[in-house]
Image: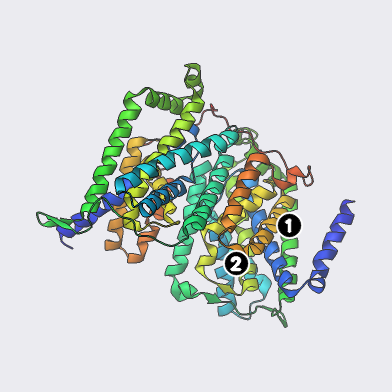
Amino acid sequence: MRQAALATGAAVVVGWPWAAPRYFVFLASLIAINAIVAIGLNLLSGYTNQLSFGHAGFLAIGAYAAAILTIRAPALPVPVSLLLAGLVTAAVGLALGIPCLRLEGLYLAMATLAFGFVVVEAILSLDWLTRGNDGLRVPAARLGPWTLATDTARYYLVMTVAALLVVAAVNISRTRTGRALLAVRESEIAAQASGIHLAAYKTLAFVVSAFYTGVAGGLFALVVGFLSPDSFDVFLSVDFVAMIIVGGLGSILGSVVGAAVITTLNDSLAGFQNYRPLIFGAILITSMVFMPGGIASALGKISGARSRPPRQGEDR
Amino acid sequence: MTWAAVVHVVVSGLATGSIYALMAISLVIVYNATRTLNFAQGEMLMVSTFVGWTVLRVLSAPLIVALLVAVAASALLGWLLERLIIRHAISATHFDVLIITLGLSLVLRSAAGIAWTHDEFPFPSFFGNRPVAVGPVRVAPVSLGIIGASLALMLALGALFRWTRLGRAMRAVAQNQRAARLMGISVERVYSASWVIASMVGAVAGVLIAPVIFLSSKMGLVAINGFTAAVLGGFGSMPGAVIGGMLLGVLENLAPLYLPASIKHSVPFLVMITILLVRPGGVLGRVARRKV
């Protein structure tokens, strides 16, 4: 049953560019990119309870890193530049994650929000590197003898990377590390008492989350082909949070579903820019008030979506 | 840079700082009662200022009427939102309520855009804009007016918290909700009151600042500066909110004089990150130790 579902899913993903119009191939790439970010964010927020409103900043760092690498070193194969984009972003995640260990809850949310704004300002002021407000055009990347010039080629690149990262995330969540992260979410004090190195695991979550988002940023640069600072504003970070809220906190399948729902919704509302935030806000409110576990838990425990964390030890 | 020019910059910094302080106070009032951050505080300010502006335009009413209408509309909005949405999620985690208020802020901003468009509108002020000379220093009356009006409102709030029954109840709930409930305080009523008072303070701040930054659906972003101000002073403390607001306003206006001019927009965020990372308790506050 499970294997049949997986096989059908894989067949649909592989066959999609032949069945769907060109635009929907592009849209599917975007969904996969957002799914990578949502998984990364979920590893941080859903697994260790550290809410981030700054993932658009990480995405921007990964995107600009990959774009600049592609422009300055055209001979570099795509997997290497994606890996480097992920590593650069992970380094920034480490630099942000260590001081953020002191913060929790809304302080962390606000610090990451501020981080997102600072990244945009930094892109604007480093215009010799990023071309600031003019935007950066990303040339088609090279993979060995091929140039990834068509939507279909880029689609297969995105899907391969996304599949690898999903498998990696599922495996992480099943290992000792994944259980340690979940223990941190359930109760930091109990986790610490069971011998889990709290600071190390929380930082690790930050770094892995940033790496995922950085790789997604690299893919974003290649697929969209044009980067400008205003594509990475705070509302994009809110979109990412909406994906994991709607999909289900602490569920990898939920992250993918959430990314698909929010990206498709965003796209179909593109003609109604005025109403988009209205509908988004309403979705956030209703899913929080009526469906706090997200789609994943509403559909039953399809992928080990766990119940929401309890309130931590406080007198309320 | 003469010292008179520096005084001018500091005074206008104190004026924006008073607005940040009022915003910080709104956030802290709600936080102290319900332990949640209201992400929609800035959008509530924006909506109520738009309501006041509509009264000005449609009825061509005097500004003071617009202020009163804005405050009343804001109180009603705050009461409704708390009663209809937040109260349902009161047993939820802070995380959940944070997301709900985030959703509210999106809805309010978008609704305002639909009702009043996303353009910028000029807003009349109680105070003139032409600088007057005070000795060798030139200051804008609007700066002095904003500072004066904000200080008066802060004193009134201080009196409310210190001497009235409601204020005592609010302070009791902030200290220990369970004990407050055992003493016969209706905690739910304190929730309502906090939202209503915070919204009213926000409406006054909105009407004061709208002439300076223009009225637009984006003006709710001032709440982020309010949050920075509250953190700077020590989140949860009222005097801290005032000091933090003033400090932030002055810093924001002084920084472009000594650093690249483009730094101005980043100042609140850089200040917020620095203070959170270096001294999360703020200038006045102490980090609360969590008991196991």
Give the amino acid type for the residue marked by disc 2 in the picture.
Ala
The answer to whether residue B72 is left or right of residue A302 is: left
Q: In the displayed structure, would residue A95 be above or below residue B238? A: below
Q: Which residue is mark 1?
A: A166
Question: Which residue of the protein is positioned furthest toward the top in this rendering?
Answer: B183
Is residue A137 placed above or below B142 in the rendered structure? below
Proximity of marks 2 and 1: CB atoms separated by less than 8 Å: no
Q: Quadrant of residue A267?
A: bottom right
Compared with A206, A79 (above or below) is below
Give the SS element for disc 1. helix
Of the 4 image quadrants, the one containing the N terminus of chain B is bottom left
Please report, as a chain letter, where disc 1 is located. A
Q: Is residue A12 visible?
A: yes
Q: Quadrant of the C terminus of chain B?
A: top right
Instruction: Give the Cα separation between the discs numbered 2 and 1.
Output: 18 Å
Q: Quadrant of residue B267?
A: bottom left
Give x and y (percent) for residue A107. 48, 44
* Residue occupied by mark 2: A85
Amino acid type of the residue that numbered disc 1 sits on in the rendered structure = Val
Task: Provide the secondary structure element on which disc 2 rests.
Answer: helix
Scheme of image coloration:
rainbow
Residue A139 or A173: which is nearer the viewer? A139
